[in-house]
Image (tube, rainbow, N blue to C red):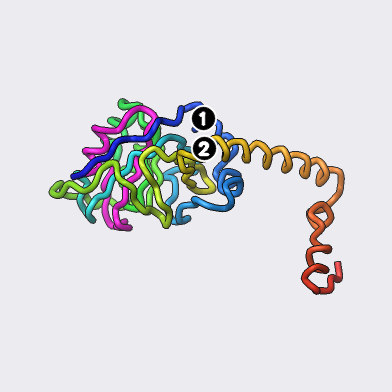
Amino acid sequence: MSTAPLPPRISPETCQALLAYGSATVFEAQGRRGAFASGIKPVDEAMTVAGTAFTCECPPNDNLTLHAALKMAKPGDVLVCDAHGCTEQGMFGDVMSSCAVGAKLAGLVTDGGVRDSATICEVGFPVFAGGICIKGTIKETLGSLNEPIVLGGVLVRPGDVIIGDADGLVVVPFETVDAVLAACKVRAQKEAAAKQRFASGETPWDVYKLGELLTRKGQASAV
């Protein structure tokens, strides 16, 4: 096991402010970067997650490291667990969810499998996972804790911000959180103005000048 110091923590209020814009807007606002693979989904579509990443890596079919992360993580942290894509395991369930709620953690994101999905929903702990499987795991090998990992195709470092909802998951590097939040505000304002024009009868073809785009590409338009 190796550990590294955490960066300065991003406040829960800032994390929630990003979540309020939604994962898709956050993704677009930071230059279409940071989206996790779409196969990692919430156990329930109503679940949302927003918090700072506490990373860990578990060998397939072994959740010992996840238990260590559960003990070490701080309130507001999201457990981000690299399970090497092993979905044929139930590495996290309602018992661990109850513990996470008691520790005031913000959620779990993993490419592995979880179980007890219905009772996880009852407990109310946000879980985003690669799959659901009843098979239990062993507790033999301690993997890395609090180190950068690649999960769902994106780099996640301790302290980065994780935002998730029914549309998907996105990671925001801790250094750029303020800039991304400002960009989300600008994007949301532009979308609100566009929606007003659409409500009055205009279409995206006109508002976004898509015909002119085709002309610049040298393509004729019949629209």
Give the amino acid at mark 2: Val
Left or right side of 11 for 113: left
Magenta span of residues? 65-92
Left or right side of 206 for 98: left
Task: Judge whether 100 appears above or below 23 on screen.
Answer: above
Give the SS element for disc 1.
Answer: helix
Q: Nearer the viewer, residue 40 or 217?
A: 217
Q: Nearer the viewer, residue 115 or 152?
A: 152
Picture quadrant of residue 61: bottom left
List the residue tagged with mark 1: 14
Picture quadrant of residue 43: top left
Q: Is residue 89 magenta?
A: yes
Which mark is first along the chain, 2 or 1? 1
- Contact, CB < 8 Å: mark 1 with mark 2? yes
Count residues near mark 1 (Cα–Cα under 10 Å), then give few for <14, some for 14-19, many for 20+. some
- Where residue 30 sits in the image (x, y, percent)? 57, 47
Question: Which label is found at residue 207?
Answer: none
Instruction: Let me know if residue 121 appears in the view.
Output: no
**Residue at 78% over, 40% down:** 193
List the residue tagged with mark 2: 177
Q: Nearer the viewer, residue 196 or 9?
A: 9
**Residue at 85% over, 50% down:** 202
Q: Which marked residue is nearer to the observer: mark 1 or mark 2?
A: 2
Give the amino acid at mark 1: Thr
Task: Judge whether 14 appears above or below 146 on screen.
Answer: above
